[in-house]
Amino acid sequence: MANHLDVSFEIEELRNLPLERRTFPPLFFNSIHKNATQPFITDGHEHYTYAQFGRKVLRLVHGLASLGINKGTLVPLIAGNSIEYVITWFALHLRGAQIAFVNPGLKGRVFEQVLTNCKSKYAFITNEVLNQLQEIDPSIYNYFEHLILIESDADSLRRMQENPKLKKIDDLYQDEDHQYVSQSHFSDVQSIFFTSGSTGPSKAVMMPNGHFFANPCSFIRITDLSHKDIVYNALPLFHGIGSRQGVLPVFMVGGQYYLEKKFSASQFWPSVAKSKATIALLTPSMPAILKSKTETPYDSNHQLRAVYNVLYDEDFEKRFKVHMLSSFAITEIGVVIYTPYGQRKLGSMGKCHEDWELAIVDEHGNILQPGQEGQLVCRPKSPFIMMTEYLNMPEATVSAIQHLWYQTSDFMRQDEEGYYYFSGRDKDRIRRRGENISPFEIETEIRTHADVADCVAVGYPAADGEDEIRVYILGAPKKDLADIKIFREWLSSRLPASMIPRYYEYIDQFPLTNTEKIDRKMLRNLALSQRSWDSQKT
């Protein structure tokens, strides 16, 4: 495997990797050797240098091979933030597996749908996820042959003695051996990320290496990332911001990565100061949350120079003494609009990425002139820099491309200088706290309640520019539905927290379009009324 070792990447090449070099093994060996003694990752308790981290990853790659995980094997990774999560991800990547990054907070039917779509004999999970697996359809749970716990306690050790399919990850580590690292190509599907479905279930986006490694390259340019930076992340690793635009670019350039388990508004600035981070990752809704907190000395007593994935806010920048950076990306296509560090135009998402062709079109697909608002559509200039397909959803794959353009369903305008400005979303999907939420999945679960005739879930504007979830329930309240608090508790046991509606309202009949379909646009635009119940004010 000498070809993995005889490589070298300089920072300028990492800013825009040629397509043929967008594979993980060369990047991995370049980093662990060039930066061997340098610190790479910490959670505030455990610390790994690049060499220590690399050795542990390679020992796990050997164990994956012994378990029967080979190139192309689809393996769900279902866990919260931890260093072990990153080690598992990198080892699966080197082995050539297709990694399904699954939200560990999924429950019930939504969880079943995701696992059924993956249909894998393997999964890397936590103790909490194990409990959730045992509450779903037994046929789905029984399909698994190997459930590997990336954390273990006395209870899980007891369960392992009773269930041969349960294993702990510590038992997989074997001698370091490069021969188990798989050769890969930029066209190979490397990972699967889940995105929302507006009129159907969540879609599994299949990403080839050429697509997967485009985002880290963009992140390096947007943030001017170098080996001197420390990136702070409290966002979930099953999302692209924390992983493809977090861990991976830091690893590629030889920087440091500080990993938190979850975001805390009250502890964010003290934690950032403790970490000595220079860049922090946020979702667009988080600046408003941070601004709402009482001022403290930590607001400016830190080393942070930039926060990424947020829109410009003059008051935020002045108070916290940081540079706010943004781009426009969609799971299916990655970053298509950005501005290199130091070249931003306030209010704009940036300019067209060099690898893409973009256009603003009207409802018939006609290209509009600068200044006119319409839907953003995109097409790549190179192969394999966007998704290959939606897993097991050929019709959804075909419908995503119209008139030879990928349809974003996001409305924008472009100025004369080529800068793009976000206007809003057209699809029924809901954007809440950095996540795309599927109304279909919320509605499917609510309709299982015996007293619900029908329902519609829509987004309702939140103060931070994203959405809250609002659900309309058809008809007058019946039985326990008369107490909406009880109904919400029932729903909370069946959906992840991110999908639980904030607003509830009974409606006598749904408004219809001229084609006799429910007019979701009208429901989205209705103001809250006395019939609306706000779960946060009760």
Image: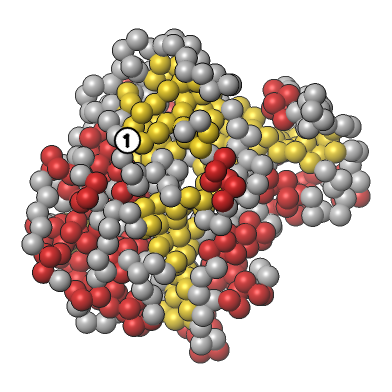
In front here: 385 or 429?
Answer: 385
Is residue 106 shown to the viewer in this render? Answer: yes
Instruction: Give the quadrant of residue 347.
Output: top left
Instruction: Give the quadrant of residue 60.
Output: bottom left
Tag 1's secondary structure? Answer: loop
The colour scheme is secondary structure
**x%, y% of residue 14?**
18, 44
User: In the displayed structure, would residue 18 be above or below residue 187?
Assistant: above
In front here: 234 or 430?
Answer: 430
Image point 58% across, 21% down: which residue? 364
Horizontally, residue 61 falls left or right of residue 18, namely right
Image point 66% across, 42% down: which residue? 199
**x%, y% of residue 50?**
17, 61
User: In the displayed structure, would residue 91 be above or below residue 40?
Assistant: below
Horizontally, residue 110 falls left or right of residue 383, namely right
**x%, y% of residue 317?**
32, 24
Residue at the disc numbered 1: 381
In front here: 62 or 189?
Answer: 189
Q: In the image, what residue type sits under mark 1?
A: Lys
Image point 89% across, 42% down: which residue? 477
Instruction: Give the quadrant of residue 458.
Output: top right
Image point 86% across, 54% down: which residue? 450
| Crowding near the residue tagged with mark 1, few <14, some 14–19, many ≥20 C-alpha atoms within 10 Å | few
In front here: 530 or 141?
Answer: 141
Q: Quadrant of the C terminus?
A: top right
Please, which residue is most extreme toward the front here?
403
**x%, y% of residue 192?**
44, 55
Q: Quadrant of the N terminus?
A: bottom left
